[in-house]
Image (tube, helix red, strand yellow):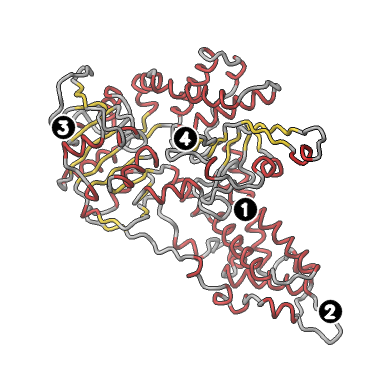
Amino acid sequence: MATAAAAVARRAGARAAAALLSACGTAARGWRRAGPARPLCTAPGTAPDMKGYLWERYREAIPQNLQCLGARLRRSADLVPSIMNNLLNPDAIFSNNEMSLSDIEIYGFDYDYTLVFYSKHLHTLIFNAARDLLINEHRYPAEIRKYEYDPNFAIRGLHYDVQRVVLVNMLSVLRYSPVHVFMFLKAVLMKIDAFHYIQLGTVYRGLSVVPDEEVIEMYEGSHVPLEQMSDFYGKSSHGNTMKQFMDIFSLPEMSLLSCVNEYFLKNNIDYEPVHLYKDVKDSIRDVHIKGIMYRAIEADIEKYICYAEQTRAVLAKLADHGKKMFLITNSPSSFVDKGMRYIVGKDWRDLFDVVIVQAEKPNFFNDKRRPFRKVNEKGVLLWDKIHKLQKGQIYKQGNLYEFLKLTGWRGSKVLYFGDHIYSDLADLTLKHGWRTGAIIPELRSELKIMNTEQYIQTMTWLQTLTGLLEQMQVHRDAESQLVLQEWKKERKEMREMTKNFFNTQFGSLFRTDQNPTYFLRRLSRFADIYMASLSCLLNYDVSHTFYPRRTPLQHELPAWSDRAPALRPPLLQEAQAE
């Protein structure tokens, strides 16, 4: 699927380049048919050539807004437009909220996908182990073993609707005729934007996309009401019918759900989606709880853990500047110890003032009842009461309130890093005033895609075409509307191209067609800063201040008429007069 996605992306870039090339003097799409543009005001008694007028605006838009990119493309010596001089830095740290590292005295870290990163083999291991548990312990058909993990199928942040919905045709009831019952099997995986709207074309039942018409009928539109959305931690509970997958470990879970759904659908097997969701969730959980994943990684650590000396470099840099550090993770003691020995060294505990394992986040941040327990060198839990969290020791469970009492580390002098926006960051920033840093590994690959010439060309023309549609929609005559429909069709095709650059099924982690995703909305709320990996800290001084960019509000943006005189949108009154 990765190869197919790459091919789609190449075709998308080629189509965009061809469109731009034609726009600056070679074969024009619509304008060739329209002929030379004529002014709207023609001789008395002669109807204006609206088609020619609109296609002329289309032609004029490209050199003015794209700096005649097509002309650049015709010169093999200069293929890259000037916009590529300002590429995005994949190793940068991005700020949602102003924060100075000079104010940070204590640094905290999650373990998995924060201090340590895993190879592509781990998700295959989790998928295969959970699939086998479904077969052996939950008595699912052995035929599902034919499905293999596809790393290119799903992305983080997707929502899964676990319910089977029954819609009754009430019109038939009111007329006392037999009731028509329409059964929709939901069990669909989808991407939702920050405004709770489903991105059509990204709804999958099993491994197949659900037609837009069916999605709109199921949800009576494309909006998901608040009461149906996942709860605060992304779970489907207390009446919420949707689960949001925010964890990187959830990628194999989404794939397994989709594969089993696919098997049942292909074989016309009736099933309850709620049961399937729970069984897959329990199987994925058991891969962790029963130690299957931990034992496999410990047995072949070089296969599963991506060695990165930069993790030690980050920790050493902070220690050299007198910063205190702590680790709070849900992973078990022996597993963390072996991993840290591999990526940091035998003396890794010397770098941390406090180490807490099997913390059971997010409960760790909310449950005041669980005390800390000391873990000895053999991994045995001790029974003595904890009066102080000592350096070099490992502690299990506990809770944040006791942690704050024993350490005194409160408020904005603490910065905690994690990859799970809900379990790692939400409670800390909302309830305790800690500063938070999100580790988003996908960020690096997405920024590299956004830096490609193909992506820049496609997005630049997409934005220009959108501006044209906004300006010229005041022309309501039939001829103009036909032209505008052509532009809308082209815009839809360009949107599909931009989605395919990132993931053929679901697109970018951070954007739907034009809006931020629900994932990005939560990231913006719960993370002061975010980055691809902790190694990005090496690019900044320990006193660096992160300033968020002042993103213009919609009412602060200049009108199209202020951007380019030739593209001044006609007012409705002017259009009607013409």
Q: Amino acid at mark 1?
A: Arg
Residue tagged 4: 235
Label 3 with label 2: CB-CB less than 8 Å:
no
Mark found first going from the N terminus, 3 or 2: 2
- Distance between the alpha carbons at the discs numbered 3 and 4: 33 Å
Q: Amino acid at mark 3?
A: Leu
Mark found first going from the N terminus, 1 or 2: 2
User: Residue at (18%, 30%) from the top-left corner?
Assistant: 347
Q: Is residue 21 visible?
A: yes
Residue tagged 2: 47
Secondary element at image label 2: loop
Residue tagged 3: 389
- Distance between the alpha carbons at the discs numbered 1 and 2: 35 Å
Horizontal and vertical percent for residue 5?
Answer: 59, 41
Mark found first going from the N terminus, 2 or 4: 2
Mark found first going from the N terminus, 3 or 1: 3
Between label 1 and label 2, give the one nearer the viewer: 2
